[in-house]
Image: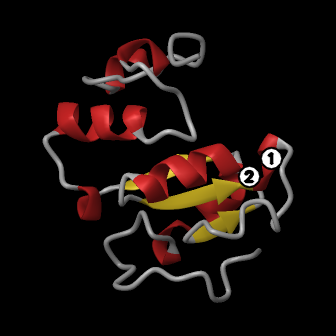
């Protein structure tokens, strides 16, 4: 997908289910990504669009931001730190999102747009 949208060159390290024994909701792929990045779980925010993404992030100690455009409703993604309609919605609210350095304490209050 990254090649198709012309972004493959922007990401130095990649992790996929091919790198681990168990797939999501097991946290193996998230832990592998943390290991490759050299970052700690509390320094990372994971973006996903399924409850399995959210669960894997939580089990690895990583905050999760969810997108509704993956076909799951807000109730199924309720454990996410923040929920946005789609990437465009996240981008519109980026400075108030958990991804922004301007966001000092992400929480779920008021995150539905």
Foreground residue, 103 or 77? 77
Foreground residue, 53 or 14? 53
Mark linked to residue 80: none
Identify which residue is drawn at 70% across, 60% down: 89
Residue 83, position as x, y percentages in the image = 67, 66
Q: Is residue 14 left or right of residue 24?
A: left
Residue 38, above or below 42: above
Identify which residue is drawn at 67% across, 87% down: 110
Identify which residue is drawn at 50% across, 47% down: 56
The answer to whether residue 93 of the structure is visible from this angle is no
Foreground residue, 77 or 55? 55
Q: Quick one: quadrant of the C terminus?
A: bottom right
The answer to whether residue 58 of the structure is visible from this angle is yes
Q: Is residue 51 left or right of residue 39?
A: right
Label 1 to label 2, Cα distance in Å? 5 Å
Residue 14, above or below 59: above
Residue 32, position as x, y percentages in the image = 29, 32
Q: Quadrant of residue 76?
A: bottom right
Q: Quadrant of residue 35?
A: top left
Mark linked to residue 86: 2
Q: Residues within 10 Å of mark 1 (few under 14, many from 20)?
A: some
Mark linked to residue 69: 1
Identify which residue is drawn at 86% across, 59% down: 73
Q: Are marks 1 and 2 in contact (CB under 8 Å)?
A: yes
Q: Is residue 75 left or right of residue 26?
A: right
Residue 105, position as x, y percentages in the image = 39, 85
Number of on-image labels = 2
Q: Looking at the image, what colour scheme do you see?
A: secondary structure
Secondary structure beneath label 1: helix
Residue 111, position as x, y percentages in the image = 66, 78
Secondary structure beneath label 2: loop
Q: Quadrant of residue 42?
A: bottom left
């Amino acid at each position: 997908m990254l090649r198709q949208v012309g972004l493959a060159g922007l990401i130095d390290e990649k992790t996929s289910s091919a790198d681990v024994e168990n797939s999501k909701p097991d946290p193996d792929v998230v832990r592998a990504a943390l290991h490759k990045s050299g970052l700690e779980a509390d320094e990372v925010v994971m973006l996903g669009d399924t409850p399995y993404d959210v669960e894997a992030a939580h089990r690895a100690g990583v905050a999760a931001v969810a997108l509704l455009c993956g076909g799951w409703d807000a109730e199924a993604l309720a454990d996410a730190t923040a929920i946005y309609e789609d990437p465009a919605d996240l981008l519109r609210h980026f400075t108030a999102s958990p991804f922004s350095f301007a966001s000092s304490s992400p929480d779920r209050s008021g995150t539905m747009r």
